[in-house]
Image (tube, grey):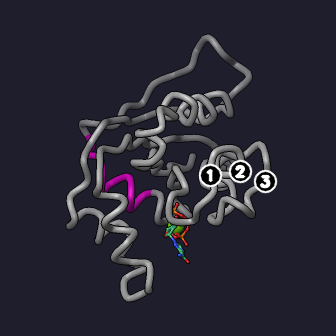
Amino acid sequence: MERTLIIVKPDAVQRGLTGEVIKRFEQRGLKIVGMKFIHMTKDLAQKHYAVHEGKPFFEGLVTYITSAPVVVMALEGNNAIAAARKTIGATRPTEAEAGTIRGDYGMEIGRNLVHGSDSVENGELEVSNFFTEAELFSWDRSTDPWII
Ligand code: RTP
Ligand code: MG
């Protein structure tokens, strides 16, 4: 069972799209195992996006993601990484398919609404960077046998 870290980025929160974004993951069948509303510190943002350090967009990316509160979620499911990234759409919203979050609501690469982990390893690492064990919950969707 994979875990992915989702961030509902500041632009999505400020545009009132938080519920819409959460709804899409929930309806897809991904299970919420952790969720909270936080204002990311610069340290956490630099750690989260460390792989992009030194790139021309890095400073702007850190400024954007720390500019206002975000919703962070740990989602669980079979192939959760790939499923979430399909639901999110391509990094550049103008290249994202209609029907994806970025394809339906985005226009700018620097304001692309949502983050999802890009590998199983990064999913585990990112979830542990944002959540303590006590903030993560294991629970059964016993009323719905169709989604595992
Ligand atoms: P994310 O990590 O935020 O989920 O996005 P991603 O995997 O689709 O894209 P990634 O390559 O990891 O880039 C991280 C974020 O950096 C910004 N970016 N700007 N101006 C540019 O060329 C550029 N490239 C990337 C985007 O906001 C992207 O989400
Ligand atoms: Mg990424």
Q: What residue is pinned by disc 1?
A: 106
Q: Nearer the viewer, residue 60 or 1?
A: 60
Marks 2,3: beta carbons within 8 A: yes
What's drawn in magenta, residue-wise?
A: 124-133
Which amino acid type is shown beneath numbered disc 1? Gly
Provide the major secondary structure of the magenta segment.
Answer: helix
Disc 3 residue crowd, few under 14, some 14–19, many 20+, Cα 10 Å: some
29 horizontally vs 111: left or right: right
Marks 1,2: beta carbons within 8 A: yes
Q: Which mark is residue 137?
A: none
Q: Residue at x 70, y 44 (%)?
A: 104
Which percent across, then down, holds residue 114?
Answer: 52, 51
Mark 3 Cβ and ligand 1 under 8 Å apart: no
Q: What residue is pinned by disc 3?
A: 97
Mark 2 Cβ and ligand 1 under 8 Å apart: no
* The C terminus: image quadrant: top right
Local SS, label 1: loop
How far separated are the C-alphas under marks 3 and 1?
11 Å
Which percent across, then down, holds residue 131?
Answer: 29, 46
Q: Residue furthest top?
A: 143
Q: Residue at x 37, y 31 (%)?
A: 137
Local SS, label 3: loop
> Where, by quadrant of the figure, is residue 105 drawn?
top right
Q: Nearer the viewer, residue 48 or 141?
A: 48
Q: What residue is pinned by disc 2?
A: 103
Magenta span has 71?
A: no
Vertical position of residue 35 compared to residue 93: above or below: above
Which amino acid type is shown beneath numbered disc 2? Gly
How far separated are the C-alphas under marks 2 and 3?
5 Å
Among the two numbered marks 3 and 1 on one chain, the one whose residue lies closer to the N terminus: 3
Disc 1 residue crowd, few under 14, some 14–19, many 20+, Cα 10 Å: many
